[in-house]
Amino acid sequence: MADREELRQRIIDAIEQNREKIIEVAETIRQNPELGYQEFMASQLLATNIREQGYEVEKPAGNLETAFRASMHGRADGPIVAVLAEYDALGGIGHGCGHNLIGASGLAAAIGMKAVMPEINGIFEVIGTPAEEGGGGKIKLEAAGVFDDVDAALMIHHAGDSTGAATQWPDGTCLAVAHFDLEYFGKPAHSGGDPYNGINALNAMIKFFTGVDALRQHVHMETRLHGIITNGGEQPNVVPKYTKARFYVRCDSIEYLNEVMEKVRNVAEGAALMTGCTVKITEDNVCYDMRPNYTAGTRYTENMKEVGLELNPRHGRGMHSTDFGNISYKIPSITGSFAISHVPIPGHSQEVVDASGSEFGYDQLIKVSKAMALTAFDLMTDPDLMASAKQEHANWDAHVQAAG
Ligand SMILES: [Zn+2]
């Protein structure tokens, strides 16, 4: 095998030489935003480009039409490291979370790793993971067994004006989130003529929201309780017989989320009891809080420096949620966060749409993709690093307690 430094340089050079192709893919995805599970163009564009690099591509993957799994084998068996590519957009905003860059980073990493795979052991994979924005694509892929053989997972994600991978608690952590639909069923009546014959499903919904507001005083500070009423009744002169809301509960750990969800369910049932309505709660995907692998994050950070990224890490818990959290409970996982702007910008915004198509944003994409591919290479070729990452993962609770 060529020496490590030479192989690492090959990764950097391959990505650099394909800079235009990678940026073009990112821009095409940015210009054609697709919602979760409808990313037909983006998933196909990435799968096709990665296949052209000589990867074996399975699509659909894990029973999801817009998911794919691309793999390239090394010269013998060894560790399996995956890079996760997201490419879904936000309704009404477009690529307001910069997932066009994450998608293109999958192609960049594929190009970089292709340059070294014939000389190293193991399998390098790019997994296309749809519907991060509330759809829980990674949760479904995990349930379908897509991550069963993977040893470690890497991603990139923009972080406004900050750059760095998490290296110590609680950096890189985020919030667990439960999503659910809430429906109340009452009985219609004429609001003027015989309101006493009606059962008001809107009253139940309002009591649910005020009940949650009371609960808000008695939960941990990081807890977030928020929702919208998607159906508040038909018209004022008919007692609403049906109402519906979409609601999220976010907490700093999955254990605490389960505790708070129990209370929220009780509030929902209490509101039904108070008004005589019946209630239906439909819970869907639950994202776990993120357990960033600090061993891999430390190496990722060193690689970020090496490729010329200016570090300006964000500290503390991120008050967002991601389905990458579920993967981080299963295998060592880490995100390389990178700036796409020189000044702070709000998340999920037009500013992100613009910055993730800017010259600076694209230059950062190329750099952070190099750092991610180098980290994948390190995990595959440095057995001590992989062993430490796995050791940390296996002892997460102790690790967190030790950090205080
Ligand atoms: Zn995102």
Image: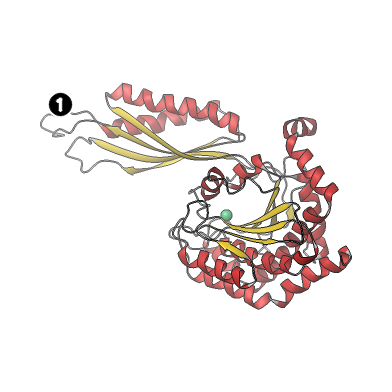
> Which residue is the extreme one toward the left?
193
Q: Position of residue 99 (x, y in %)?
A: 57, 60
- Give the left or right position of residue 268, taking residue 292 as reference: left
Question: For residue 97, which quarter of the picture?
Answer: bottom right
Instruction: Say above or below: 19 vs 343.
Output: below
Q: In the rendered image, is residue 2 in sight?
A: yes
Horizontal side of residue 96 vs 91, given as left or right = right
Q: Where residue 168 sits in the image (x, y, percent)?
A: 78, 43
Q: Residue at x 80, y 31 (%)?
A: 402
> In the rendered image, which quarter contains the C terminus?
top right
Q: Quadrant of ligand 1?
A: bottom right
Q: Check the picture and name the quadrant holding the N terminus.
A: bottom right
Residue nearer the viewer, 363 or 145:
145
Q: Position of residue 140 (x, y in %)?
A: 51, 46
Q: Which is more toward the observer, 317 or 23?
A: 23
Left/right of residue 17 with respect to residue 3 in the rendered view: left
Give residue 120's quadrant in the image: bottom right
Residue drawn at (86%, 69%), measured in percent from left and top?
Answer: 6
> Up-down: is 2 above or below 395?
below
Q: Which amino acid does label 1 sit on?
A: Asn
Residue 365 seen from this side: no
Under circle 1, the secondary element is helix
Q: Mark 1 points at which residue?
A: 197
Up/down of 250 relative to 16, above or below = above
| Residue occupying image coordinates x 41% and y 31% | 210
**Among all residues in the image, which is located at the extreme front?**
76
| Crowd band around label 1 with a 10 angstrom C-alpha radius: few (<14), some (14–19), many (20+) | few
Answer left or right for 90 relative to 105: left
Percent x, y for residue 52?
A: 61, 73
